[in-house]
Image: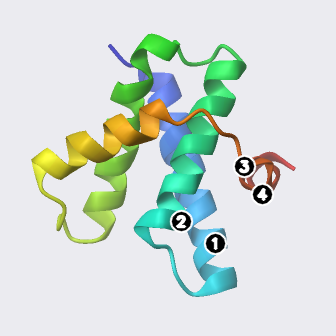
Amino acid sequence: MIDIEVSKQLEQDFEKYMLQFFAKYQRFSLEDFGTFAVSILNYNVNNHRIDKKLKEEYAYFLISLYNKGIGNRITEEHLREIAHVIAMDHQVDFNVINDLYG
């Protein structure tokens, strides 16, 4: 089960990053979101804030926030699939991390 405090922090990070990114580039596509989600989750796994066994649950939490922001246009099946793909990726884009915490 995901931790409420970690979820709150991820939601704050998502909102902050999305607003900064949109202000700079005038877009926040699913691909842009994916780069953010993969990076922030892996960063938190590497820093032991998130148990890697729960990474897919946190990925689902984040994609659900994104979906809510675009008017719930992504189906449940696709939400699960996107969360799985995000959880399987092990990259960290440190530009994302620097934008959030730098």
Q: Residue 93: which numbered mark, if any?
A: 3
| Residue beneath disc 1 | 21
| Residue beneath disc 4 | 99
Inspect the image, locate mark 3, and give the three-letter code of the amino acid beneath it. Asp
Inspect the image, locate mark 2, and give the three-letter code of the amino acid beneath it. Asp
**Residue at 60% over, 32% down:** 90
Observer-nearest residue: 28 or 9?
A: 28
**Residue at 53% over, 65% down:** 32
* Disc 2 and disc 1 in contact, CB within 8 angstroms: yes
Counting residues from the start of the chain, the first of labels 1 and 3 encountered is 1
**Residue at 19% over, 51% down:** 78
The nearer-to-camera label among 3 and 4 is: 3
| Image vertical order of residue 45 relative to residue 100, above or below | above
**Residue at 65% over, 39% down:** 91
The span from disc 1 to disc 3 (Cα, nearest Å) is 14 Å
Residue 29 location, x and y as percent? 45, 72
Counting residues from the start of the chain, the first of labels 2 and 1 encountered is 1
| Residue beneath disc 2 | 32
